[in-house]
Amino acid sequence: MTMTKKAPSGKHNAIEKALEILLKFQDDKAGWGTRELSGELGFSPATVQRILSVLKSYGFVRQDTRTRQYVAGNIFYRFLENLNNTNNLTGTGRQFMEKVARKTCETVYLNIIQGHLRICIDTIESNRALKAGMPIGNQSPLFAGASAKCLLAFSSDRFQKEYFAAVTPAPVTEATIVDPDALAAELAKIKTRGYAVSLGERTPGIGSVSAPVFDYNGRILASLSLAVPEIRTRDKHHFSHCITLLTDAARAFSWAMGQPESVTHCTPTPHHF
């Protein structure tokens, strides 16, 4: 869950309270009731209800007719095109994503760290009948799935230390690695190998491979990933081909983001589940 700094409710003005409420809808909890938000943020139920009513009238939140909980509104879709046009990461990365999508025919997606979560910021869906989806805005914990583990593995030691001090891994599926020693070994293997793989760690029946994208200082910017139905991960030739194409694209993406071409990268080795 995304961590937000709380201040005593009396120290918030109306705009700050509205923003605090809106920020709760970026967490991995999709829906909120009025009293839940009141208890979470320390605002009175009447204040929360009044703000939610205004946010709802402008489309920032909507109310589920069945559960009566509030969820993020459709107005946020209006911001996506503008964000993609102005965000240098997605703008630069699109050419590499399109190349990988065209040559693998699998779903390609781009991810960043937001708080303690992995969030998908761009995606190109496979045109195959059997495919794995990854919508923009999808979130997951940083210990589950290749795209998340890649981001965590190549993050600084300080970030990893602070992350594990704040987060206790819990299973998302039966395949999620949550044992501290096993997870530490997995992250070290990813860093040595140069890419991450997973099968069913976040969604049963879905495999993925993910490679890091770095900036000019060698810091992790994003992970470039492929989502592949499990049945096609068993095709050794296809999956090895996917790994090679993806790692090559991530390397070129990193160079485009300023990483010197003289920086050496690990040569990917075939991986089979």
Image (tube, helix red, strand yellow):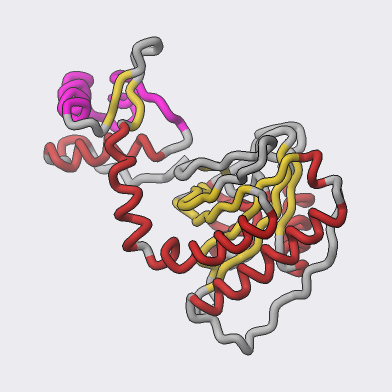
- The residue sitting at 50% across, 77% down in the picture is 256
Q: What is the chief secondary structure element of the magenta stretch? A: helix
- The residue sitting at 85% across, 45% down in the picture is 234
Is residue 138 rendered to the left or right of residue 176?
left
Residue 12 image point, x, y percent: 16, 40
Q: Is residue 271 visible?
A: yes
The answer to which quarter of the image holds residue 56 is top left
Looking at the image, residue 165 lies above or below residue 169:
below
Residue 26 image point, x, y percent: 39, 40
Residue 31 on the magenta span: yes
- The residue sitting at 64% across, 40% down in the picture is 132
Looking at the image, residue 150 lies above or below residue 4:
below
The answer to which quarter of the image holds residue 249 is bottom right
Looking at the image, residue 258 lies above or below residue 83:
below
- The residue sitting at 71% across, 63% down in the picture is 195
Q: Which of 165/131 is in front?
A: 131
Residue 84 on the magenta span: no
Q: Which residues are magenta?
A: 29-57
Residue 185 image point, x, y percent: 78, 57
Q: Which of 17/133 is in front?
A: 133
Q: Which of 226/263 is in front?
A: 226
Residue 61 image point, x, y percent: 28, 29
Q: Which of 33/168 is in front?
A: 33
Is residue 175 rendered to the left or right of residue 253?
right
